[in-house]
Image (tube, rainbow, N blue to C red):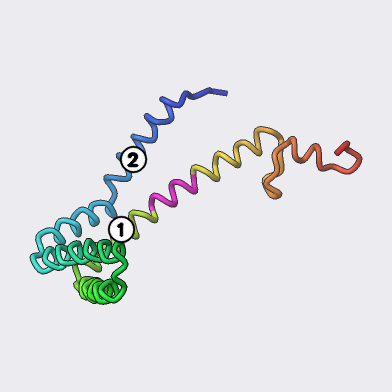
Amino acid sequence: MTLYTKDDIVARAKELAQMISETEEVAFFKEAESKIHENQKVREKIASLKSLQKQAVNFQHYGKIEALKMVEEKIQKIEQELDEIPVVQQFKESQVEVNEILQIVASSISNTVTDHIIESTGGDLLRGETGAQVKNSQPGSCS
């Protein structure tokens, strides 16, 4: 059995990260993000949104509930307007796709490590128990 160091694992993780960054999904994400920043309408709405969010924080801090409600309504309206813009929809979809890849990779690593631990200890994959658990859960064993 080969023993790897943390540095070995981090180096491989960086290789995997490089591979992920060169996928079709990430390329689409970068393109969509670029289009958002080129779109004057989107930039103006984002600037308004940021300004309103700052106002909301101040109103909340000073307990100005009615003013806060009005600002929150404006924020919600701008967010809805942004969501209706095709380039924003594309950007959000691309974010979801990239996040899905990252979740798949994280789950795959976690599940594989768990399976290897169970198998290497003589455990039961179907029950998800390590060898020690299997040994100590058998009838007649001291518990």
Quarter holding residue 135: top right
124 part of magenta stretch: no
Nearest to the eye among marks 2 and 1: give it. 1
> Viewer-proximal residue, 52 or 5?
52
Q: Which stretch did the figure color magenta?
A: 101-108
Badge 2 element: helix
Q: Quadrant of the N terminus?
A: top right
Badge 1 element: helix
The vertical placement of 18 against 27, above or below, is above
Label 2 vs label 1: CA separation?
16 Å
Label 2: few (<14), some or many (≥20) within 10 Å? Answer: few
Q: Position of residue 6 (x, y in %)?
A: 45, 26
Residue lying at 38% horizontally and 52% vertically, measured from the top left = 101
Q: Position of residue 131 (x, y in %)?
A: 73, 36
Q: Residue furthest right?
A: 140
Residue lying at 36% horizontally and 39% vertically, measured from the top left = 16
The vertical placement of 1 against 54, above or below, is above
Total marks placed: 2
Helix, strand or loop: magenta stretch:
helix
Task: Tell me which amino acid carries mark 2.
Answer: Ala
Quarter holding residue 28: bottom left
Q: Name the residue beneath numbered marker 2.
A: 17
- For the residues bearing labels 2 and 1, Cβ distance under 8 angstroms: no
Q: Name the residue beneath numbered marker 1.
A: 95
Q: Going from the N terminus, do you reach mark 2 or mark 1 first?
A: 2
The vertical placement of 34 against 67, above or below, is above
In the shown orientation, is residue 58 left or right of residue 136?
left
Task: Tell me which amino acid carries mark 1.
Answer: Gln
